[in-house]
Image (cartoon, grey):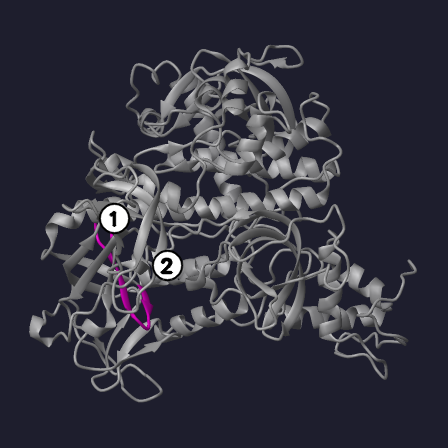
Amino acid sequence: MLALARRPWQTVGCGSYPSHPDERRPVNVPEPSREAILDFIEEERSAGREVGRREIARAFGLDQGGKIWLKRLLREMEQEGEIGGDGKERPVHPRGALPPVLLCEVKSRDRDGDLVAQPLEWNEADDGAPPRILIENRHEGRRKPKDARPAPGVGDQVLLKLTRLRGVDGFAYSGHVLKVMGKAKAAVLGIFRALPDGSGRLVPIDKKAQGREAIIPKGRTGEAEDGDLVSVSLRRESRFGPPEAQVRERLGSLKSERAVSLIAIHAHGIPHEFPPAALKEAAEAPLASLKGREDWRELPLVTIDPADAKDHDDAVHAAPDESPDNPGGFVVTVAIADVAAYVRPGSALDREALERGNSVYFPDRVVPMLPERISNDLCSLRENEDRPALAVRLVLKADGSKKSHSFHRVLMRSAAKLSYQQAQAAIDGTPDEKTGPIRESVLMPLWAAYGIAARARDQRQPLELDLPERKLVLKPDGAVERVIVPERLAAHRLIEEFMILANVAAAETLEKAGSLLIYRCHDEPSLEKMRALGEVLASIGIKLPKDGALRPVLFNRILGMIKGSENETLINEVVLRTQAQAEYVAENYGHFGLNLRRYAHFTSPIRRYADLIVHRALITALKLGEDGLPKSVTLAELREVATRISAAERRAMAAERETTDRLIAHFLADQIGASFDGRIGGVNRAGLFVKLDGTGADGFVPASTLGGDYYRYDEAAHALIGERTGESWRLGDKVHVKLVEAAPVAGALRFELLSAGRTVATGRAGKRSGGTPYGTSRPAASFGRTGKTRPGKSGAGKRRR
């Protein structure tokens, strides 16, 4: 056994353990405590090492009987929510723990003057209050070294190496500063409204600040004009009147709704202008040649994308496998634009791509990760044009399982640029001039290969949520024309499944080569969220199993049970909220939603920096060129990259969601007084969040307008319940509402309820005692006072894989 130096979490003298499997604890020995095991797991993870049963047993000197006891203990700890992973097939990690390295924002100082930080991106609605992190002061009481990092201050964004504190003085973690990323903007954003006397007022863009305008005195308006988006600094606060402000920067005019995305771009600090050095590199980049590549230009690869796509970074091909030892099998080829050939590590393009992390897709514009010369030209797999690609050839068996795969650096030529609708129509028997000639030779083999791949997918049973995504169709001037729910076609599922297969192959290849990479991981739901789901299911007569490993199939069975029922929307929403947030990490812990042990993003390097890292790692590991991932790159550096791009992804999601909210608020602003059908998409103490049918618009119903009762918030039931009347509104309930206020700049809508709620027992048990039919109208007089507009909340939306 490997001799280890004793550490603080270790115990001494682990004697003999019982070998009988029914024995739960060792006999007459000081076995390691749960806390000692958690300390060991966290220490190893901080050092970049995966932890399983073997490592824990070795560290604590356990014999065979002790290993049996440890297996049972880890199972208990997993079931009770202390850890994730079973320690054998899935590495162990503290449940709900923050990653070892995290991007945070310094929020305040405590009473001792120490800095306190919180995670920069945190979904309080889903994950509760953010953890408090005490920033270590390692130079206190001694001279600061010359090469020390700059000290952070309140408002700074910092990259921290975290250590678990287990609630010491109210702190969940301490953090050592690895890097000060810069100041968070202290300025306030808003829309400048000019007044006749030369002064102005600031209309805030934040939903939470609605009704709190600022005055901009004459002479402090800068060059701002009416309708401009401006950045201001607050100069004077007042207890009795609006604060005074001064314009710091004019950010652009919002007189056209096409500029609505400007608000989100500036509010979230999304880089949207490329530096001259990056544009120069892009302009001077030559088209990659055949040198060092395989010539695949005769292979009829095709791109299948949305009809309005401007860049095409993936192409596919399939053909029956001619090998006699694989009857009924297929060879599927996925070719991905070779971005690594143009964006070299450390270059100006690379630095800017890392800063952006990903492309951001607004309804009215795209903020790309790379300049158009790269994304829409050199790396876009255009029809009948030579383009460099990194391709994976996947050999599938007749049952859809993967027999083998190989990666190749190639020069390809797309045989056709197709939309999803075009490809689907051809397969359904109505090809057009472009798809007709390639239907039998190219498209039908693709569909046949997808057919067998879908069998393996069904066998794997990933999570299947049914939450339709809406798309805004804009007019030429950028205003919303209508809101649609695009049909989900087999062509969409085909491309999605082939991309997943390619992503898995990339992760497997790099793991086998012992290469560092960035994984796409998705943790299983926390114990607290599973308990909340169980309470909601119990309210509709479904019992959530308490035993057994947590798998996506459990959720799929639940969703199958309620499909077509009145509770379908409710349970889909609650199951979605039960899921963790997917993230990029440098150490793998699997992808729960896809039910995959290893998964990496490989298929979109034009728009995701994580994919570019994976491309570079493959080039280096497989010796496909000199422009791969430098061998000097460390695990710590990849952790930092993974943290930054995970934060950039969450930033993009928030900005995209807010822009959609603002555009829909503009769309509905002239319909004040109109009534709509919808569903309750969220509940909290302040009121109800309602999502309208058709448009998917999100608005708020303040609890103060619900009636003459006091409404108690039942967190377990996701409901507001009247103490006296028993009238209640629950997540997922159908409602009829009237639009009473719209704030397009903030994307906020306020509704009043026109329908009655359910009736439940008013005792503490809260058991239901019948119900009132939906849609029953209620007179406006039955509402209480009309409250101020509350912050709206858009639905959680589909989580990105």
Query: Quadrant location of residue 40?
Result: bottom right
Left or right relative to 564: residue 226? left
Amino acid residing under circle 2: Asn
Residue that protrudes farthest toward the front in the picture: 219
Residue 401 appears at what percent x and percent y?
59, 39
Question: Which of 784 and 445 lies nearest the eye of the viewer?
Answer: 784
> Quick check: 3 above or below 723?
above
Query: Quadrant location of residue 471?
Result: top left
User: Within the magenta stretch, is there residue 689?
Assistant: yes
Query: Quadrant location of residue 740?
Result: bottom left
Residue drawn 38% across the image and 42% down it: 266
User: Within the magenta stretch, is there residue 117?
Assistant: no
Q: Helix, strand or loop at disc 2?
A: helix
Residue 616 appears at what percent x and percent y?
65, 29
For mark 2, does the 10 Å Cα neighbourhood hold few (<14), some (14 to 19), or many (20 or more) residues? many
Amino acid residing under circle 1: Val
Residue 572's disc number: 2
The answer, for residue 9, to whether it is visible in the render is yes
